[in-house]
Amino acid sequence: MLPVKINNHGQEPIYRQISSQIAALIRAGRLTPGQQLPAERELALQLKVARGTIKKAYEMLVQQHYIVAARGRGSLVADSPVSQQDESERERQLQSRNNDSKTANVREAERPTSRLDLATQLIENCIMQLEDVGFAWREMADIFNLLLSRREERFSQFAIAAVDCNPEALGIYQSQLAPLTHMSTARFLFAELREAKDPAAVLAPFDLILTTSNHIEELRSLVPELADKAVPVVVSPSQATLIALARLNNDSRVGVLYQSRRFFQIISGWVGKSGFNGDLSGVCYLDEKTDAIEEFIDDKDVLIVPPGFAVQLPSELLHAINIFRQRGGQLIDFAYQIERGSLLYLEELIKNLLNRPGKKQ
């Protein structure tokens, strides 16, 4: 066994403690040229450290020319003894190489990398640093799981509300924010808040209140005491939706299935901007009878529908939609969405609010 002792509470990394003590044994002649050092796994078990820590210590000793790595024979003490003067010079050279390596690592870090590669690099660096201060792998896993659970709990307690004038638009908040925040979004119509006895009390439990940039002033005037929580987002049709609208033929008969009259007006506005000047009409599929909606569909060449509308339709209407498509009718899913810039802003804002000083851990 090597007479090496580790100070888990010291400032010097553990791998450097090991390498410096082995170097001292070699200089003192207690380890002689050609003598075989313990295998990495064996010494790791003896010192109760990770094998990677021993590997780093041995690599440093190889760089300092104290030992050599012989294929099939493990690590051996080098033939040429190292004097104290040589040691100082080698330390200087090693420090220079380390500085060069750090510079190269900085340059390497500047290169584009995938999110998975970046996460792997960050976690591996953290593991090595924790090894150097004496943490076992089981301890690291326990700490990581604890901190991750705390983070998840903080996110689960972060509440977001969305306010808009029509139910179709409210649906986009839930679908787009769920992957971003991993939490559900409460949804309110302006009509509901206006009828509420105390709108501010309804929205007070939420950390953020979202609405479109067109409605932000209306929201702030409705609940002035919560104005600092109100955040505007920019919404617009998806690129695929805009392309589909731009390709509409003026000779086509276009119909819109909607829940609210306001959403029909929004669609009409975007259809007009696309340059379509043909026949456009709409029907509320929640209010009209099935026969009337089927008759409406049967008369159309193109149908524009809100996203996710199919889950609200009875089987008879789904059958009518399938017949419409089978006879060559075009179905346009009006994907109204939060623009990417607003999503990035929200992501940063949520992180800042969760990490702000004084926020309960």
Image (cartoon, rainbow, N blue to C red):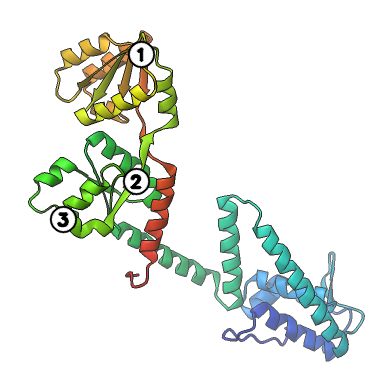
User: Which tag is nearer the camera, tag 1 or tag 2?
Assistant: 2
Q: Residue at x 32, y 30 (%)?
A: 307
Disc 3 on helix, strand or loop? helix
According to the image, label 1 marks what residue?
325
Q: Residue at x 41, y 41 (%)?
A: 339
Disc 3 residue crowd, few under 14, some 14–19, many 20+, Cα 10 Å: some
Q: Residue at x 22, y 52 (%)?
A: 220
Disc 2 on helix, strand or loop? strand
Considering every residue shown, the one lying at the far bottom of the view is 28
Residue 341: x and y, percent?
44, 46
* Amino acid type, callout 3: Ala
Q: Is residue 23 left or right of residue 203?
A: right
According to the image, label 3 marks what residue?
200
Tell which of 310 and 293 is nearer to you. 293
Residue 233: numbered disc: 2
* Amino acid type, callout 1: Arg
Disc 1 on helix, strand or loop? helix
Q: Is residue 197 left or right of residue 265?
A: left
Tell which of 190 and 274 is nearer to you. 274
Residue 45: x and y, percent?
64, 75
Residue 313: x and y, percent?
23, 24
Image quadrant containing the N terminus: bottom right
Q: CA distance from mark 1 to mark 2?
A: 35 Å
Task: Identify whether 3 is placed above or below 233.
Answer: below
Q: CA distance from mark 3 to mark 1?
A: 46 Å
User: Which tag is nearer the camera, tag 3 or tag 1?
Assistant: 3
